[in-house]
Image (cartoon, grey):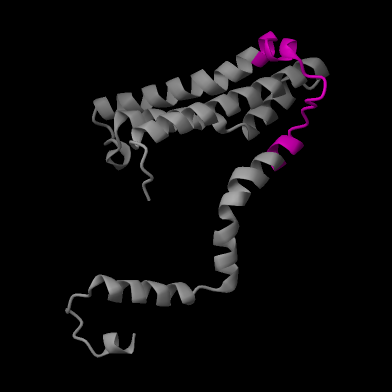
């Protein structure tokens, strides 16, 4: 590392020197920052969804197929899964076609659609609205919560699949 300080500022570095710099910079991160980075995946993909499910107030113990096919549950699920993806994709596509906006990040249409699908995961506000709409009916509120969770799960799984296919199976950073 000390040999780098003696070099001319415009001199190019080889891969080993770049790796040495990267490792040196990584060592400068605080232990808390490294700890947070190490836990990010576990927290984002396990702890947060579990926390959200636990705080949604849905009792899954007595939930049968009839709860999933109730009109309120189906409506909430379709609103999150189909409504959000169609609305977001159509509005964004229209803005692009009318040249009001460029394609975000030069993405493909399939990636744009995948992001539109993933928008259906946002169930926190949907649960809040369901609580406001059905405050006087515990049965309908539970149906709405089941629908919101089902629609969010479907949007997450389908959106993941679409985005995975859009990247050609390779992970992009």
Q: Residue at x 26, y 36 (%)?
A: 102
What are the residue bounds of the magenta stretch? 51-73
x%, y% of residue 51? Answer: 71, 42
Q: Is residue 60 left or right of residue 82?
A: right
Image quarter of residue 112: top left
Residue 50 picture quarter:
top right
Q: Is residue 137 visible?
A: no
Q: Is residue 30 visible?
A: yes
123 left or right of 65?
left
Seen in the picture, residue 32 relative to 59 is either above or below; the reply is below
Does 169 sit above or below residue 24? Answer: above
Left-right relation of 167 to 131: left
At x 57%, y 33%, the residue is: 122
- Residue sitting nearer the eye, 30 or 169: 169
Can you give x and y, in whole percent of width and height, for residue 32 in the image?
A: 60, 69
Give yes or no for residue 97 being in the magenta stretch.
no
Q: Is residue 35 above or below residue 141?
A: below
Q: Is residue 71 located in the magenta-colored stretch of the structure?
A: yes
Q: Position of residue 108 (x, y in %)?
A: 29, 33
- Name the quadrant containing residue 140: top right
Q: Residue at x 20, y 82 (%)?
A: 9
């Amino acid at each position: 590392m000390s040999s780098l300080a003696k070099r001319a500022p415009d001199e190019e570095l080889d891969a080993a020197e770049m790796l040495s710099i990267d490792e040196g910079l990584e060592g400068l991160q605080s232990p808390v920052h490294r700890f947070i980075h190490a836990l990010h995946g576990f927290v984002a993909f396990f702890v947060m969804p579990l926390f959200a499910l636990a705080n949604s107030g849905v009792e899954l113990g007595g939930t049968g197929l009839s709860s999933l096919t109730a009109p309120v549950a189906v409506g909430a699920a379709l609103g999150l899964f189909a409504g959000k993806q169609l609305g977001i994709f159509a509005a964004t596509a229209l803005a692009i076609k009318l040249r009001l906006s460029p394609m975000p990040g030069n993405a493909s249409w399939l990636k744009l659609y995948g992001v539109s699908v993933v928008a259906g995961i946002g169930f926190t506000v949907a649960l809040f609205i369901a609580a406001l709409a059905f405050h006087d009916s515990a049965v309908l509120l539970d149906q709405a919560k089941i629908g919101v969770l089902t629609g969010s799960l479907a949007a997450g799984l389908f959106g993941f699949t679409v985005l995975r296919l859009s990247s050609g199976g390779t992970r992009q950073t």
